[in-house]
Amino acid sequence: MSTTHTRDIGDRHDLDVLLRRFYAAAFADPLIGPYFTQSAGTDLEAHLPRIADFWERSLFRTADYDRDAFTPHAALDEARPLTAAHFGRWVQLWHAAVDGLHRGPVAERAKAQGERIALAMLHRLAGRDAGTTGEGPGFVPLAVLELRSAA
């Protein structure tokens, strides 16, 4: 695994660079890319400031974010069901983007937060017990374990 930076995520600029790297990979990914390019029709330039606000609030508590992140995902799921494989791939790409640029406690918190978000979204979309009882669409962190073991 090659790294461009070894410092931690420190500010909004770092988040902007990280998010551009992540979304470049996500848009190109054969599994989740169509959700961005076909289903959601995501305008990246319009989306990035909002998602950067989300991550800045989540990691640094310095930005305002009062949007509902679940509703757009629920609409996507209704049009084209999202599964544990989709969320697992999102987590893998998120980890790869973070690891490719940053090392440190904030970077680790960003990866852990990404895992929590993916699992919470999956549970909300599929039912609160999905993936934890052996029923339902599966358990997202399995993909994370596979990613970590490959590192």
Image (cartoon, rainbow, N blue to C red):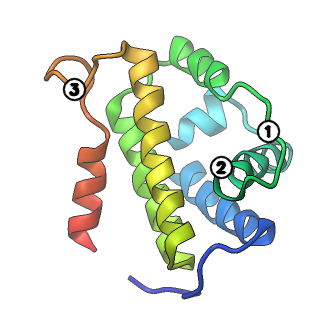
49 above or below 118? below
Q: Is residue 27 rendered to the left or right of residue 85? A: right
Q: Please name the residue that numbered disc 3 is placed on.
A: 132
Which amino acid, by three-letter code, is at mark 1?
Tyr
Where disc 3 sits, the SS reads loop
Q: Residues within 10 Å of mark 3 (few under 14, many from 20)?
A: few
Q: Earlier in the sequence, mark 1 or mark 3?
A: 1
Q: Is residue 30 visible?
A: no
In terms of image quadrants, where is residue 123? Answer: top left
Q: Which quadrant is the N terminus positioned in?
A: bottom left
Question: Residue 30, position in %: x, y?
Answer: 45, 46
Which amino acid, by three-letter code, is at mark 2?
Ser
Q: Which mark is residue 123?
A: none
Q: Is residue 130 rendered to the left or right of residue 99? A: left
Q: Please name the residue that numbered disc 2 is placed on.
A: 58
Q: Which mark is residue 65?
A: 1
Q: Earlier in the sequence, mark 2 or mark 3?
A: 2
